[in-house]
Amino acid sequence: MNYNQLSIDQAPSISTPFVFFLTAPLFAITAALIVIINGAEIFQDRWLPTTLAITHLITLGFITMVMMGAIFQLLPVMAGAPIFKPQITSRIIYGFYTSGIICLTTGFAQQHPLLLKIAVFCLAIAFLTFLISASIALIKSETSGASVKGLSYSIAALWIATSLGILLASGHAWDSIPLLRHFTGLHIAWAAIGWITTMIISIAYQVIPMFQITANYPKILDRNLTTGLFFILLAWSGLEYFNYSANLSFKWLSTLSAFTLCLLIITFVVITIRMQIQRKKRMADATLYFWLIGLINLIIALLLYVFASITGHNLDFLIGIVFFIGFAMSIINGMLYKIIPFLVWLHLHRKLAFKTDSRSRIPTMNDVISSRKSLLQLVLHIIALLLTILAIFKPEQFIYLAACSWLANWGLLLLHMIQSILLYRSCFASK
Amino acid sequence: MKQEITLDVHELQPPEPMQKALDALHTLGDGQYLKIIHRMQPFPLYDILTDNGFKYKVTTGKVSAFDIYVWHAKDKEVEKIIKDLF
């Protein structure tokens, strides 16, 4: 079979994903500062205004911020499907998205309806622009395969998570709109499982065998898992909705579908960890450890969810922290240590590879961010994560230590990113 | 001088496949083309090729998923050979 020569001259410039990547630690640092100001009280109730602000600084400000930036780069690389006019589109998204997050979190923290209204407006524009652009790119993609299919499901899930989020935020912002708090579970599930977990699984299909030189995933898994997750999530959502609105008693069925979701994801994690342990090259870098930490935390979060569902214990904070910070942030953090050096290396090659006087100046990926640097940040990340988990049980003793260690950790991540950009620029300056 | 230079990168860890492809392209003479055996379509490489005066053709591979043929855009003789191949 012959393939058409793809025109991907619309591939994004290096600044497109980097703007998102550089902003993410700033929001995370803001979250840590709010924790320092408010102390242990943030753990009193998940509905506290400050707690809602911190949650969204992490989920929207860090996790989704990096994922959006990565999508701009991933779609051309993985699917051969660049987003239309990536520079302009990304600037529109970035402008509305950052303004939306600032207004949303300040609106939550200050209980300020006007800020929340502006946030709803900005976030709706940002997400709509992003979702429409990414959806069109994926529809036009001629590439098939497990990763692209998974990415499509994660984008579809983000449509649903966003719609529910906008509905909930509107309930906070406008008195005339009811606050449908019972939709929060659906919002979280579509964001956490549908968007974040499905996208990480899709990325894993590509990067685990490629970067960690493992065997490929079993065909049955990579062909069916993301489809299964999406439709079980859909069935679970329907059951949850009918249980509530029609007061029907399908509780056992919705619990069964939730547990099936957990089981499928745990199967994926166990297979991935086994592949990593049996990898062909016994190389170990920070990214591998970030993945391992993330995957172990994912299993713990899912088992805690199952335990809490069976016993009725309230483990919301623990599950939330283990999932969003222990799992999602760990893997995203680890991927940044691969993506950033690769992008710097790639864009330098694009511009300088065939200029004889400049070629020797192109640094290796390890020159961009050395293993020593990423391992140092890994250690800080582990310490901060452990202190945060301890802080749930002994808030007074550990909350400030945990917040300060996250400050140091995200500060270091930001520093490494800035150093990478400076190195990139220096390659052009030193002609 | 060999007309076809074959480069099998399908088992290498990124960014080695692209590095090796670029190294090979630096030595590519007139009347020669590079055949890259790859497990995936190297989309980022295509940008570099287009920006630097190369053309390429992608086909289903025998050893791995894809064979990518690359030649100098100005080399019409090789372009004809590639066309005749498929």
Image (spheres, coloured by chain):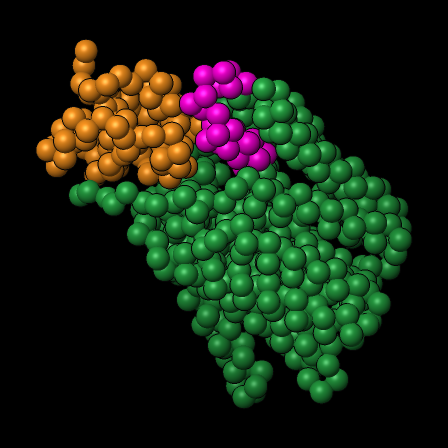
Horizontal and vertical percent position of residue A326: 65, 46
Q: Name the residue at 47% across, 49% down.
A: A201
Magenta stretch in the rendered image: A337-361
Is residue A383 shown left or right of residue A423?
right
Q: Quadrant of the C terminus of chain A?
A: top right
Q: Nearer the viewer, residue A273 or B8?
A: B8
* Prevalent SS, magenta region: helix
> How far across and down, in percent of the image, does residue A214 sit?
41, 32
Give left or right: position of A4 versus A54.
left
Identity of the residue drawn at 59% across and 63% down: A126
Q: Residue at x 66, y 50 (%)?
A: A62
Picture coordinates of residue A285, whole percent (x, y): 56, 27
Quadrant assignment, res A401: top right
Instruction: Confirm whether the magenta stretch covers residue A341.
Output: yes
Question: A268 or A3: which is nearer to us?
Answer: A3
Residue A127 horizontal/vertical position (percent): 57, 64
| Chain in green on the image | A
Q: Is residue A258 visible?
A: no
Vertical side of A384 occupied by A107: above or below: below
Outermost residue to the top: B1
Q: Residue at x 32, y 45 (%)?
A: A6
* Left or right of B81 on screen, residue A233: right
Res. A91 visible in picture? yes
Instruction: Report whether A384 appears left or right of A220.
Output: right
Q: Quadrant of the N terminus of chain A?
A: top left
**Which color was chain B given?**
orange
In the image, residue A224 lies in the stretch drawn in magenta: no
**Foreground: A222 or A414?**
A414
Please, which residue is most extreme toward the left here? B84
